[in-house]
Amino acid sequence: MHYLDHAATTDLRPEAADEWLRVARTTGNASSTHGAGQQARRILEESRERLAEVLDCDPIEVVLTSGGTESVNLAVQGLWRSRQAAADAVVLPDGEHHATLDTVAALAADGATVRPVRLDAVGRIPVGEFARAVAASGAALATALVANNEVGTLNDVAGLAGAAAAAAVPLHLDAVAALGHVPVSFRSWRGDAAAGAGLVALSVAGHKIGAPVGTGALVVARSARLSPLLHGGAQQRGLRSGTQDVAGAAAFARAAELAESERDAEAARLGTLRDQLVAGVLARVPAARLLGDPAPEGRLPGNAHLLFPGAPSESLLFLLDAAGISASAGSACQAGVAEPSHVVQALGRSEAEARSVIRFTLGRTSGDADVDAVLAVIGEAYERASGAAR
Ligand SMILES: Cc1ncc(COP(=O)(O)O)c(C=O)c1O
């Protein structure tokens, strides 16, 4: 099997699995005051400290969640609900993940206004337009991806955070696709922004870096005001009530430390593999085009997002799958119906083009054999998929 969909989810790291099992075997609720509870509490807080070290924030700012979707919901809904009396607009770049898009759509039903920001042709948020959108009156919050999970384009995060700080608007960053691949630093991106302004919240998910599914975190600045989604025992500064998942936290911390320590070497290795994959595909399918930023330093190292004109994504995915290759169209696929990618359309591409893309994403377990497998079949797969569509 050649797994080239690491952006969807990646292999569980054995060290994270071991840590999970070891901690899961200990009894104790981290909120209990007896010895067993205090032992759980100690492991939990150590895990929080380890995560804070990787994310470059204070441990108290790490709010553990069930994953990326929950983190994004807590940030976007929480910020909007705490500010809606004063301001109702959400600055929303095109091409965000559905966790963000659909959360904002739900808020729109409650009275939020949506202030879109168009992407440029490589999928990057233009800082100037973003700055104008946050500075216009009535902005309750802004949100943005650190790295686009489909086309892999990296944003100018310092520029976006600076614009939000200058406008005194709170900013949420979705770093789910970025963590483990490019530097993520809450403290430096936050800078010396005033209380409650600039970068105040940052989402990450464990399963993208080799921790178990069901782990994640939202970094929430001490000064941020956020309405919680979950009410109950007031754990985690009252922002996320519920008994805390100590084993999940320990496994997430272990995976994050490993991903961070391997990051530079892996980025170089995967960047080379990615370039071989892209060059090989373009040599075999001259009509194909790389989408996103063509500059290696402007995109996620393991991301190769390609347009195959005239070849439906589903047909290509089917033919690749038959050859033992798992890739994706990078778009939500519900009830078996592939949607045209909203991200590809946000780059100015047509709906037909947005239905003719494949996202190959490399990860820790990827190697030459995976690239070779794609190159062995992609030419014929394109011929068949585009021929059948004619
Ligand atoms: C950029 C981005 N944000 C949010 C999510 C949602 O994360 P989760 O699957 O952990 O809920 C994903 C998952 O693909 C993502 O890529």
Image (cartoon, helix red, strand yellow):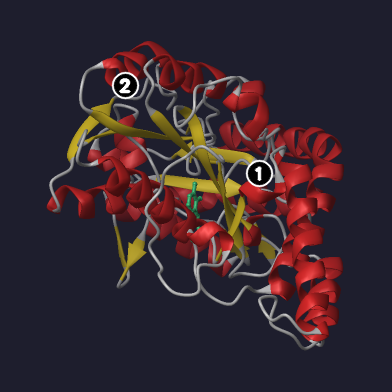
The quarter in which the N terminus is drawn is bottom right
Nearer to me, 163 or 240? 240
Q: Specify the quadrant of the image occupied by residue 225.
A: top left
Disc 1 packing (10 Å; few <14; some 14–19; many ≥20): many
Q: Which of marks 2 and 1 is in front?
A: 2
**Residue 317 horizontal/vertical position (percent):** 47, 59
SS at badge 1: loop
Q: In this view, does 69 lie above or below 171?
A: below
Q: Residue furthest top?
A: 128
Which residue position is annotated with label 2?
134
Q: Is residue 88 above or below residue 37?
A: above
Horizontal arrangement in the rendering, residue 124 relative to residue 43 (left or right): left
- Does any atom of ligand 1 lie closer than 8 Å to the CB of label 1? no
Look at label 2 and name its amino acid: Val
SS at badge 2: helix
Q: Which residue lies furthest to the front in this view?
A: 33
Q: Is residue 58 above or below residue 69?
A: above
Which residue position is annotated with label 1?
179
How far apart are the two marked residues, 2 and 1, measured between alpha carbons?
25 Å
Disc 2 vs disc 1: Cβ atoms closer than 8 Å?
Answer: no
